[in-house]
Image: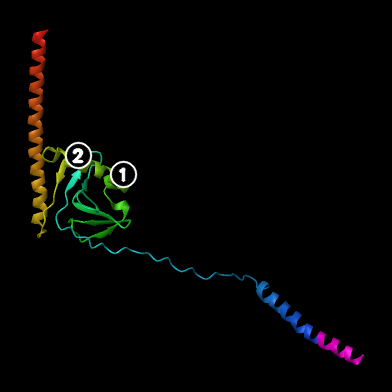
Amino acid sequence: MEKKLLLMMIAAALAVPVSALAEVSVNVNVGVPGAVVVPAPLPRPRVMVPAPPSIRFEAPPLFLAPPQLGFYLGVDVPYDIFFSGDNYYLYYGNSWYRSDFYNGPWIVTERRHLPPGLRKHRVEYIRSYKDREYRAYDRQRDHYRGRHFRPEHVRGEHGEQRRGREDWKEERKHEKREMKEERRREKEEWKEERRGHGRRD
């Protein structure tokens, strides 16, 4: 009997601190007025800036300008390179790059900073025009009437690049003169034809 009483007293003594601790624990966590739990800060997202590509063209690419797009496409190269305004643009590894020379150095450019014509179209859409226009150029070669140019091979202080554009402008003037002359000839031929048909009637 004494053993049972002793065991009950020990059990009661052990039970008191546990309930007291539980009560203290509840009071500390819940009973503190104005306690605010602040979560640990999330790690800051890392912005990954792609390294500029080290693409080098051994020869200047040929650029064609489909009238539907309004900018130039590099067509005889395995890369998506474009020319608009005074800059070259490269789409490589899902990123856009810009340079004032077709061989770089390339600077990362956000899509929103692209020229409007280039920004307006998806790359896949541009590629379909690129292939179509290159086939037209390849078939016609010497008689191709679309706008095209091949930049200077060597970049100097500033002269070569400008000279390349000046040559292109001069070439365009020459093409316009030729087209005007050809239209004039066609018009004359058409008038001659009409006169010939009129005599027979």
**Towards the viewer: 199 or 106:** 199
Position of 169 relative to 109 (above/below) = above
Is there CB contact under 8 Å for labels 1 and 2?
no
Q: Which residue is tagged 1?
A: 125
SS at mark 2? Answer: helix
**Towards the viewer: 5 or 185:** 185
- As shown in the figure, which amino acid type bears the numbered disc 1? Tyr
Quadrant position of residue 25? bottom right
Residue that sits furthest to the bottom in the current view: 2
Residue found 32% across the figure and 51% down from its top: 112
- The stretch in magenta equals 1-11
Q: Position of residue 88 (x, y in %)?
A: 21, 53
Residue that sits furthest to the right in the current view: 1
Q: Position of residue 39 (x, y in %)?
A: 54, 69
Left or right of 173, for residue 69: right
Q: Position of residue 124 (x, y in %)?
A: 32, 47
CA separation, marks 1 and 2? 17 Å
Viewer-nearest of discs 1 and 2: 2
- As shown in the figure, which amino acid type bears the numbered disc 2? Ala
Q: Position of residue 160 (x, y in %)?
A: 9, 55
Other-residue count near label 2 (Cα within 10 Å), few / some / many at <14 / 14–19 / ≥20: few
